[in-house]
Image (tube, grey):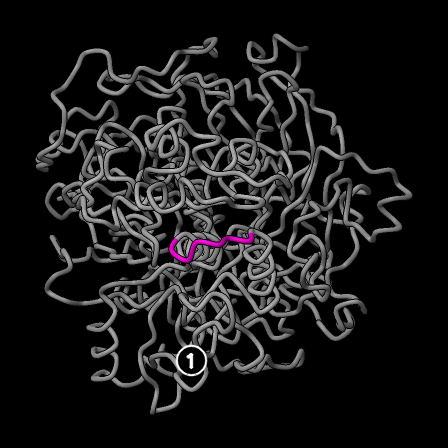
Amino acid sequence: MSRHRQFLKPKRSTLSHARHLLPPPTLPPSIRSRDKIHPPLRDHARAPPDTQPRRAGQRATMGRPPCSPRSLPLLLLCCLSWQLLHALPLCTDSRAPVTLNGTLAFFCPYYSGSSCCDAAADAALRKQFQAMNVSDDACAAVLKSVLCAKCSPFSAELFNSSSDIRMVPLLCNSTSSASSAQSKDSTQDYCKQVWETCKDVTVLNSPFQPSLQGSAKLPSSSSRLTDVWQSENNFCASFGGSSDDQSVCFNGNAVSFNTTEPSPSPKGVCLERIGNGSYLNMAPHPDGSNRVFLSNQAGKIWLANVPEQGSGGTLQFDEASPFLDLTDEVHLDSEFGLMGIAFHPKFATNGRFFVSYNCDRTQSPSCAGRCSCNSDVGCDPSKLGTDNGAQPCQYQVVVSEYSAKGSSPNVSATTSANPSEVSRIFTMGLPYTAHHAGQILFGPTDGYLYYMMGDGGNKGDPFNFSQNKKSLLGKVMRLDIDDVQSQKQISNHSLWGNYSIPKDNPFAQDTDLQPEIWALGFRNPWRCSFDSERPSYFYCTDVGQDAYEEVDLISKGGNYGWRAYEGPYIYHPEWTPGGNTSLSSINAIFPVMGYNHSAVNKNVGSASITGGYVYRGSADPCLYGRYMYADLYATAMWTGAETPQSSGNYTSTLTPFSCSKNSPIPCESAGVGTVPSLGYVFSFGEDNSKDVFFLSSKGVYRVVRPSLCGYTCPTEKPATDNGTNTPSGPSSSGSVTRVGKSMAVAFTFVVYALHF
């Protein structure tokens, strides 16, 4: 089987290497032997010798191929030039900006390089401006700049609002936010400038109308600002300030970013061990309590109470009484099992939840999905051959709906689920036995179900499923599970189960895409998450082949490059029965963060990324706002930040970690100082308090106050006796779960292969 996905790590003195990387843990022979299958890194990540570094997080620019790891001097040059990594900004329709050959012509000339307006959108803005019939030249210039803000590559942030419609961007107003450190020059008082320039000018169909902050249509009558707004203060209270996250506003010419200094960089991450079990998934209870759902690969889901920070407690639940036991439905093997759980946003009242798992069609009559290798995608199953003795599409991916026992409004009090499936949401046969990801989660603002799918396996995605717009392999899907379909509708629309298609999925603009697809070009996306404070930021980590592990920012319709690219490298597959994708035919989006394989495990020769969360907890203020991710081997962890917020500039730092002196369950030592041995980091979790957890082969670890490990954070608050303030829900059964070492070892064998 093939390996994982990686991303170039800058090796500058400015990066924090607080400790040397630990030696990799001793692996079982079955795992070590995998590395012998693969030739050295240099043989697989080649690029032409004239390659030049490219900024991460941006679309590909033809004529400037990415770095090649082949040449050490060139590699070092690439590393030195990549300390700041650039994210991909978003447009108001959740798409990435389009790349322009030059400055946008005609009406809106302000945005060059990339823009959220094509020629048609530009023409529509011109028409809107002409319909205003503005006679005053100064006010006309102001209104033109306001309308053209729609073309800004950061328009999603500029127009971000809880309302259904926002017709104008957030106008910079230096007096509106005490937390903003923006200077009080004319650009930062742009809202005042708009008021002073246009307050007495008659404007037809003015965008500055109170009704437009709701969902009403544009008024046809003419008006002046003073006809609607009593004063500048009233006007700027509605249209001025910073964005909803206090970081972005429009100053008349461009985006103005909050220049407030970020929190101090973390000196290290302090962990406490609160459980011994090995789990793949953690999901907070939607009722907002201190409870979480945990699931293991074998097919069991438990409901557990999380102890307060500083209480010295451990996870509390009854191992013998799972919330749901699907071990009879789930096919468990090195690559298979229960992959994901997701609870409906209204679970506390409707009791609906969803499980992603694998089944074997030779063992289960309900395991009967269509094969992902079919004539619609130009694939013949008879050409695939067998994989470890398995026939093509013998193993399948499944998403099923289940329900909690009990009825509204008492769902939150229930501690078990009905074992019978409510509905089969999705079933699809896999071409091979690897790279099927399987995570599911609900979008925090749209309520749709996002389903992560790998490329289906085999080294180098030989049939090029990830770039095939008719295939669902190598994709992030977005499904509506609230609009129930009839069997006739499912058949007529060639759906893979009981769901419907959100009308704003990318297929509405790109008819070549399968309707389910939200983004494409992934190898094996292993753990994705939304930033809870900035939900337009959707992070996914993608496991690399031989060179890079990458962190991607997901946008609507975005193509993340595999297998034309592996991270920023051009990828050259060894076997291509499914054909190749030319670099000029795609607009690849590159990673915002990541690391190189050789930087992590020189002895083992491979690595595998595990994605985490943007930390929004209160225990470690120096971690706040930083994205956390780790390597499977648990020898390295990184924290990355966008500085300033919404600027698109990312830095990533190798961050040491240690075990708290007050850990409720003592941590095992890795034999190097105070570094704990976590085994393998399979996944991350987050609870309702926004605490972040490591889910590893040796237990569950929570991020706690840095001072407990001797790390210094200037903004850390003094210790309190009451921990978090999250209200507790009904208690689960009170025994402390301590899964034996034999289970942890079994999961080490089983889940490791998921990254290959």
**Residue 645 image position (x, y, % from top left):** 29, 48
Left or right of 261? Residue 733 is right
Left or right of 465? Residue 274 is left
Q: Main secondary structure of the magenta part?
A: loop
Q: Amino acid at mark 1?
A: His
Q: Residue at x 56, y 62 (%)?
A: 126
Above/below status of 179 relative to 35: above
Question: Is label 1 in a helix, a strand or a loop?
Answer: loop
Q: Which residue is mark 1?
A: 44
Residue closest to the far right: 488
**Residue 111 image position (x, y, % from top left):** 41, 66
Q: Is residue 137 magenta?
A: yes
Q: Classify 10 Å Cα crowding around label 1: few (below 14), some (14-19), many (20 and above).
A: many
**Residue 688 image position (x, y, % from top left):** 40, 24
Left or right of 334? Residue 552 is left
Quarter of the image where one finds residue 314: top left
Q: Residue at x 57, y 58 (%)?
A: 130
Q: Residue at x 23, y 11 (%)?
A: 722
Range shown magenta:
133-138
